[in-house]
Amino acid sequence: MDLVVLVSGRGSNLEALLTAIENGRCRARVSAVISDRPQAQALALATARGIPTQIVKPADYADREAWDHALSAAVAEFAPGLVVLAGFMRLIGASMLSRFGGRVINVHPALLPAFPGMDAPAQAIAKRVSMSGCTVHVVDAGVDSGPILSQAAVPVLEGDDEASLHARIQKAEHALLPAVVDAIATGQLSLDGPVPRYVGSTDGAERMFAWPPLI
Ligand code: GRF
């Protein structure tokens, strides 16, 4: 399955995905990496591996709609089977959703529906929760509100601040995202119906994809 990965920042999730692909844990291929920010460090990770990159930045367009249209055209050039938002810090709009709706996934640093939006680790610290984690979900028109595909829980420890909690959550993200992409790429997790479905069970039961896998 061909992926287009959208990034805005450091790219540690992109790197985890590329590493998992290189060592056979994620059976997919990154066709392109597209960013809204020319300075995103993630772009260098792609370039170093010979993966095409593109920048589609909002400042070059009249409004959000025009930017979203240009973004969807840039993504469409690579005809991906799946679009992965890996630290992409903008909401996609109607154009992206009408072309790729249901096949765009995002990784978020909290156990949704808790703490959607920006600064999820800081929100978790402020609320003094004892567990947080990360979620991979299908992107819809809302803020981190689409169907949940899989989650991994992470403890919040005494003395944690936003940075230390986010670092612990990111370790979980780096395992979860490639696992979910692999499940989609290999047909174990289907995004084709009205609701995402885990179709890999041998006993005929339908379950959600679980990470770590259920025994
Ligand atoms: C991740 O924590 C992800 O959950 C959030 O943005 C962060 C991106 O980190 N959406 P990176 O750029 O992949 O290192």
Image (cartoon, rainbow, N blue to C red):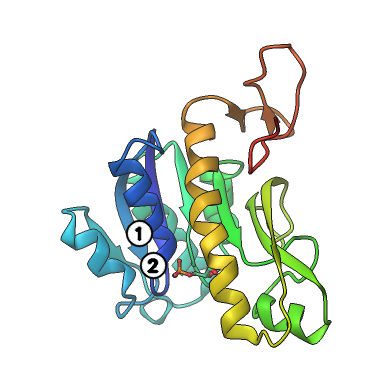
Residue depicted at 73% across the width and 11% down the height: 203
Q: Which SS class for mark 1?
A: helix
Spatial CA span between label 2 and label 1: 6 Å
Residue depicted at 52% across the width and 53% down the height: 96
Q: Quadrant of residue 200?
A: top right
Tell me the quarter of the image containing the N terminus: top left
**Between residues 196 and 96, which one lies in front from this camera angle?**
196
At label 1, counting other C-alpha atoms closer than 10 Å, the crowd grade (few under 14, some 14-19, many 20 or more) is: some
Horizontal arrangement in the rendering, residue 94 relative to residue 61 (left or right): right
How far across and down, in percent of the image, does residue 101 sit?
Answer: 59, 44
**Between residues 183 and 4, which one lies in front from this camera angle?**
183
In this view, 191 is above or below 89: above
At label 2, counting other C-alpha atoms closer than 10 Å, the crowd grade (few under 14, some 14-19, many 20 or more) is: many
Q: Residue 15 carries which label?
A: 1
Horizontal arrangement in the rendering, residue 146 relative to residue 102 (left or right): right
Q: Which SS class for mark 2?
A: loop
How far across and down, in percent of the image, does residue 4 sit?
Answer: 38, 49
Q: Is residue 78 visible?
A: no
Residue depicted at 51% across the width and 51% down the height: 175
- Provide the residue designation for mark 2: 11
In this view, 118 is above or below 178: below
Q: What residue type is labelled 2?
A: Gly
**Circles 2 and 1: CB distance less than 8 Å?**
yes
Q: Which mark is residue 160?
A: none
Tell me the quarter of the image containing the C terminus: top right
Q: Quadrant of residue 57?
A: bottom left
How far across and down, in percent of the image, does residue 20 sit?
Answer: 37, 45
User: Does the beta carbon at disc 1 come under 8 Å from ligand 1?
Assistant: yes
Residue depicted at 41% across the width and 38% down the height: 26
Q: What residue type is labelled 1?
A: Glu
User: Does the beta carbon at disc 2 come under 8 Å from ligand 1?
Assistant: yes
Q: Is residue 108 visible?
A: yes
